[in-house]
Amino acid sequence: MSQPVFTLSNPVGLYDPAPNGYSHVASVAAGARLVFIAGQGGEDERGRLSPDFAEQVRQALDNLRVALESAGASSRDVVKLTVLIVDHSEERLQVFGNLLQAAFGSGAKPTGTLIPVPRLALDGMLFEIEAVAALAAG
């Protein structure tokens, strides 16, 4: 297992974001290879979309894992997540947080931004997640 090429931190003077599933700051080492993953929704490989929010989140996180692995990365290499949620609520945040914890494990989470939106690209799409990962160059 290679050493991360970034550090995550939560500076004194800012609240603890861990319960909400993210870190405040990510510092990436010079020379790292950055991987940008486009927004992944809850569609399965055939383009089918469940009407259930939790199932869409679960599928989107699985799609993110597939995209990361295709670039030689994993969740432990992710430095930034951007999440879009239709009709955002505390309940949906908790669903996302629990599924993110299951997918990313118990360590520090990447930096992140959650954006409530009125709709996404496809009818019925309720969730989308994009990522930036950092890997050792070469």
Image (cartoon, rainbow, N blue to C red):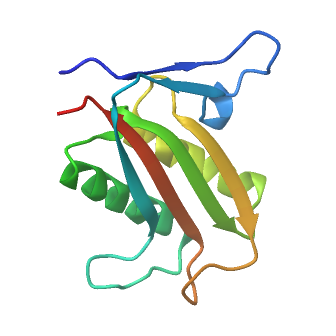
Residue 93 location in percent, x, y? 67, 51
Quarter residue 106 falls in: top left
Give left or right: position of 70 versus 57.
left
- At a point 52% along the width and 41% down the height, the residue shown is 80
Q: How many marks?
A: 0
Residue 56 location in percent, x, y? 48, 68
The quadrant of the image that shows the N terminus is top left
Q: Is residue 83 above or below residue 73?
A: below
- State the residue in front, 138 or 76: 138
Judged from this view, the residue extending furthest toward the top is: 12
The quadrant of the image that shows the C terminus is top left
Q: Is residue 15 above or below residue 137?
A: above
Quarter residue 92 falls in: bottom right
Q: Is residue 99 above or below residue 86?
A: above
Give left or right: position of 137 versus 96.
left
Residue 64 location in percent, x, y? 36, 56
Judged from this view, the residue extending furthest toward the bottom is: 123
- State the residue in front, 134 or 69: 134
Give left or right: position of 70 versus 43.
left
Residue 52 location in percent, x, y? 53, 74
- At a point 60% along the width and 73% down the height, the residue shown is 126
- At a point 28% along the width and 40% down the height, the residue shown is 74
- At a point 35% along the width and 32% down the height, the residue shown is 76
Judged from this view, the residue extending furthest toward the front is: 31
Quarter residue 4 falls in: top left
